[in-house]
Amino acid sequence: MAAVDADKAGEDGAWQRLDKFLFFARFCKSRAVAAELIAGGLVRINRQPTEKPHAKLRPGDVLTLALAHRVIVAKVLSLAPRRGPATEARRLYEEIA
């Protein structure tokens, strides 16, 4: 039996790990930075605080990110299979005023 990538174990097209999404959507420079942001209690999913980098994120969820200089509220439009260019990443979410 072929080895299964630990990150993909259990993931399907309906959801994605929160830390991966933050990295793929270019909110964070790495998954480690995303995990620190999440563990620090600076991320909410649908108004619910989470400290788990492995939290499930689905299209339609609303993220609240308390970054260094501002708070971003964004609706997840789609999930990404990889970290692409900034123009591609921008299509993954829509900022809510």
Image (cartoon, rainbow, N blue to C red):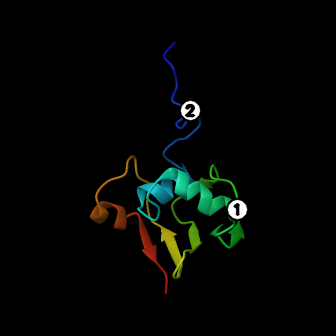
Kindly identify the residue that appears in the image at 57 percent across and 72 percent down. 65
Could you tell whether 32 is left or right of 89 in the image?
Answer: right
Examine the rendered structure and indicate whether residue 14 appears above or below residue 64.
Answer: above
| Residue 57: quarter of image | bottom right
Q: Residue at x 52, y 78 (%)?
A: 72
What residue did someone put label 2 on? 6
Which numbered disc covers residue 3?
none
Q: Which mark is residue 50?
A: 1
Residue 93 in the image, given as x and y percentages of width and height: 43, 68
Give coordinates of residue 9: x percent, y percent: 57, 33
**Amino acid type, label 2:** Ala
* Residue located at (41% from left, 62% from top): 26
Mark 1 vs 2: CB contact within 8 A: no
The answer to whether residue 18 shows anywhere in this view is no
Give the vertical position of 74 relative to 54 (above or below).
below
Q: Would you place residue 9 above or below residue 13 in this image? A: above
Give the residue at the far bottom of this rendering: 97
Which secondary structure, mark 1?
A: loop
For the residue pair 52 and 88, the one nearer the viewer reads as 52
Q: Residue at x 68, y 73 (%)?
A: 47
Q: Quadrant of residue 68?
A: bottom right
Asked if one can make out residue 63 in the rendered structure from this viewpoint, the answer is: yes
| Helix, strand or loop at mark 2 | loop
Q: Residues within 10 Å of mark 1 (few under 14, many from 20)?
A: some
Residue 42, image x, y percentages:
64, 69
Distance from the alpha carbon under mark 1 to that under mark 2: 21 Å
Query: What amino acid type is highlighted by mark number 1?
Result: Thr
